[in-house]
């Protein structure tokens, strides 16, 4: 039943002010799994950029845990795994994978589809990046780019440590066309892409 809930895509109809109907495709994520991980000091020791990826798919559980590590809600008061200036919580993580682009809704711990296209080729500006199972895109609505960048840095370091903990490869990436990616993700003017991060299992 648990597994079924992972793959269940729920279609929610919302009525816009205009009366027009828009359909949001959402995907439930399993609860973060807190068991059986390496100790923090071992993860820190293993943290590194690795520009090489295999074909093995990243499971829903791993993706859920990774997103929670990035910006998930870790307390009853709604605060996150990363600190944010004045608790602004301005950072949103998007996931780019084979079945489209998804926005992580941290409060509901769910994915909301923002594109049904595989946008990974947009991030393949370096050869190794073509093979990554998924890319995370860190988007901030902060008025101050420096603040947004600091928040993105906290989140990608959490993900880097999570990857080290699980034996996944990852690399933070600033080399891509921000404008094309922002368009493809249907971002608003106040949403700035800070950086991306390619993630996947090592090659066999
Ligand atoms: C903000 C930022 C942007 C980066 N952009 C790229 C990139 O576009 N392509 C790439 O291959 N590596 C990129 N890197 C990875 C760095 O090259 C890497 O962290 C550095 O060489 C140190 O290696 P290490 O992460 O294994 O310690 C980036 C890292 C950061 C923090």
Image (spheres, rainbow, N blue to C red):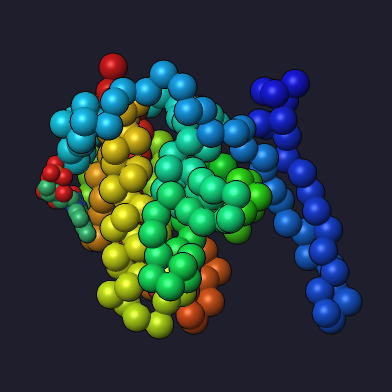
Q: Is residue 173 above or below residue 193?
A: above
The residue shown at (46%, 22%) is 35
The residue shown at (29%, 58%) is 153
> Where is the N terminus found, in terms of image quarters?
top right
Where is residue 197 shown, x and y percent of the image?
32, 49
Where is residue 167 shown, x and y percent of the image?
30, 25
Q: In this view, does 70 lie above or below 187?
A: above
**Residue 168 position by quadrant:** top left
Residue 10 lies left or right of residue 116; in this view the side is right
**Residue 14 position by quadrant:** bottom right
Where is residue 51 shown, x and y percent of the image?
20, 38
The residue shown at (42%, 76%) is 142
Q: Can residue 171 be seen in this view?
A: yes
> Where is the C terminus found, in terms of image quarters?
top left
Q: Who is closer to the viewer here, 159 or 10?
A: 159
Residue 42 lies left or right of residue 24; in this view the side is left
Q: Who is closer to the viewer here, 13 or 204?
A: 13
Q: Who is closer to the viewer here, 109 or 180?
A: 109
The residue shown at (48%, 80%) is 190
Q: Is residue 49 above or below residue 189?
A: above
For this orientation, the residue located farthest to the right is 19
Residue 108 lies left or right of residue 95; in this view the side is right
Q: Can residue 121 be seen in this view?
A: no
Where is residue 43 shown, x and y percent of the image?
24, 31
Q: Who is closer to the viewer here, 34 or 47?
A: 34
């Amino acid at each position: 039943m648990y597994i079924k809930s992972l793959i269940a895509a729920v279609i929610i109809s919302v009525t816009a002010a205009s009366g027009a109907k828009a359909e949001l495709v959402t995907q439930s994520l399993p609860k973060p799994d807190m068991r059986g991980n390496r100790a923090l000091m071992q993860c820190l020791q293993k943290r590194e950029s690795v520009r090489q990826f295999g074909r093995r798919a990243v499971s829903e559980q791993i993706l859920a845990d990774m997103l929670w590590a990035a910006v998930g809600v870790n307390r009853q008061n709604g605060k996150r795994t990363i600190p944010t200036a004045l608790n602004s919580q301005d950072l949103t993580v998007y996931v780019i994978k084979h079945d489209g682009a998804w926005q992580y809704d941290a409060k509901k711990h769910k994915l909301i589809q923002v594109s049904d296209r595989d946008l990974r080729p947009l991030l393949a500006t370096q050869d190794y990046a073509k093979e990554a199972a998924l890319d995370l895109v860190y988007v901030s609505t902060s008025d101050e780019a420096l603040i947004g960048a600091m928040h993105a840095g906290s989140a990608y370091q959490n993900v880097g440590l999570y990857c080290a903990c699980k034996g996944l490869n990852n690399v933070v990436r600033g080399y891509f066309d921000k404008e094309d990616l922002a368009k493809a993700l249907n971002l608003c003017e106040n949403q700035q892409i800070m950086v991306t991060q390619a993630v996947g299992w090592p090659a066999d």
